[in-house]
Image (cartoon, rainbow, N blue to C red):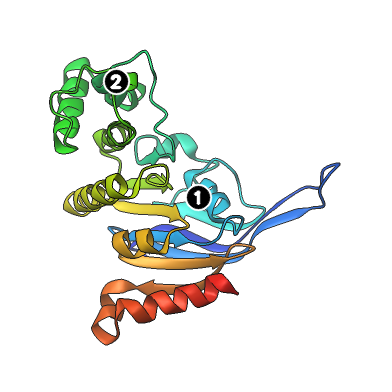
Amino acid sequence: MTAIAEISLEGVAKWFPPTATRAEFRAVDGLSLDIARGEMVALLGKTGCGKSTTFNLIAGLIAPSQGSVRVQGLDPFREFDALRGKIAVVFQSDRLLPWRTAIGNVELGLEMLDRPPKERHEAAQHWLVRLGLSGHEHDFPHALSGGMRQRVSIARALATDANILLCDEPFSALDEITGQRLREDFAALVRENRKTAVFITHSINEALQLGDRVIVMTRPARIAYDVRLEAERRATNDGAIRARIEEILAA
């Protein structure tokens, strides 16, 4: 692990014990990865390649069977409380509480961090405006479109001012035009606020649009291709990168 690594996995493996219907399942095997502060990293791979397990290891939701995971130098599973407020998660579904308004949903994460009411309200209002939802602060989720609900979800994550954003296919449920616009807005806000972002996706287009770095994973979660796009674009073009990704995913 380097001094500037915000997230580090070293020799990580994760396996799940056998059940009545399944033999022992190895989801991650020998994964080593450093993510620097301020990087926006796309974990790309086919369904079942171990992306979500890797995501859950970083989020501290599960412990590795072997190897070590560190987030800001801490073990995210054993020191989960120490990372409270430093990691925010954006899920595939918006996970809004239907009985709370948009601003009430954005305030939720700040309530869990015990922030004072005035601070919660001001931060929630600020991020709803930044996400293009001015005038919808008091709308309930049922009155919002799918894209608007996901904007509320992203505002909720950003309002906590966490240094690290973990995103689990947050745009996959949206139509292409809505998803494209929201991806552009999300990427701009992450870069503007110098956050570290890791998002999992099965979309090559999404990975190339959002990532400063794209990591292609194969099963069980191993790195098959790791490309930093800015450096690669000086020497080649997106077409060559895309072709290489397609070749790996087709194997």
Q: Is residue 221 above or below residue 105?
A: below
Tell me what residue is drawn at x 25 percent, y 48 percent.
186
Q: Nearer the viewer, residue 200 or 198?
A: 200
Q: Marks 1 and 2, Cα distance to the nearest angstrom?
A: 31 Å
Tell me what residue is drawn at x 39 percent, y 35 percent.
84
Residue 200 at x, y percent in the picture? 45, 53
Q: Quadrant of the N terminus?
A: bottom left
Q: Is residue 102 above or below residue 173?
A: above
Q: Is residue 250 above or below residue 121?
A: below
Q: Look at the numbered disc 1 and give the secondary structure of its residue.
A: helix
Look at the image and tell me whether residue 236 can be seen: yes
Residue 120 at x, y percent in the picture? 22, 22
**Residue under circle 1?**
55
**Residue under circle 2?**
143
In the rendered view, does 24 fall on the left or right side of 87?
right
Mark 1 against mark 2, which lies toward the viewer? 2
Tell me what residue is drawn at x 14 percent, y 32 percent.
129
Tell me what residue is drawn at x 55 percent, y 60 percent.
46
The mark that comes first in sequence, 1 or 2, is 1
Look at the image and tell me whether residue 115 can be seen: no
In which image quadrant can residue 209 be found? bottom left
Q: Nearer the viewer, residue 84 or 135?
A: 135
Three-letter amino acid code of the residue under disc 2: Ala
In the rendered view, does 238 fall on the left or right side of 10?
left
Answer few, some or many: residues within 10 Å of disc 2's Cα (few below 14, many 20 plus, some between 14 and 19).
few
Residue 210 at x, y percent in the picture? 30, 59
Q: Find out whether the residues at labels 1 and 2 contact each other: C-beta distance under 8 Å.
A: no
